[in-house]
Amino acid sequence: MKPHYFLQDVADADDHQLGMAKRMGYVPSTCLLGGAVVMGEIRKGDNPCWGCAGPRDVCHGRPQQLTERER
């Protein structure tokens, strides 16, 4: 799987980890971050959008912010 789909209009349909994260509400349905990256951030207890450099005008993700470890 790809780390992100920023150069595409939509994420690959076969990225099952991303699909699961979308269904569970961790990320918006328009998220373009790769599923493995998303799940890794969730496992760490972080919001996947916080460190994502993706195009918010396309993905409609939450704003970037520092994690607790970065503060």
Image (spheres, helix red, strand yellow):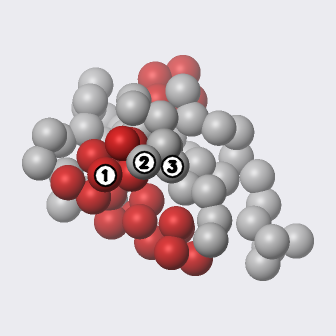
Q: Are marks 3 and 2 in contact (CB under 8 Å)?
A: yes
Q: Position of residue 56 (x, y in %)?
A: 56, 29
| Residue under pointer 1 | 20
In the displayed structure, would residue 33 be above or below residue 46? above
Residue drawn at point x = 25 percent, y = 38 percent: 11
Q: Position of residue 2 (x, y in %)?
A: 24, 57
Q: Amino acid at mark 3?
A: Tyr
Q: Residue 24 got which mark?
A: 2
Residue drawn at point x = 19 percent, y = 52 percent: 15
Q: Position of residue 38 (x, y in %)?
A: 43, 59
Q: Is residue 54 left or right of residue 23?
A: right
Residue lying farthest left?
Answer: 14
| Residue under pointer 3 | 26
Q: Amino acid at mark 1?
A: Met
Q: Are marks 1 and 2 in contact (CB under 8 Å)?
A: yes
How many tags in the picture?
3
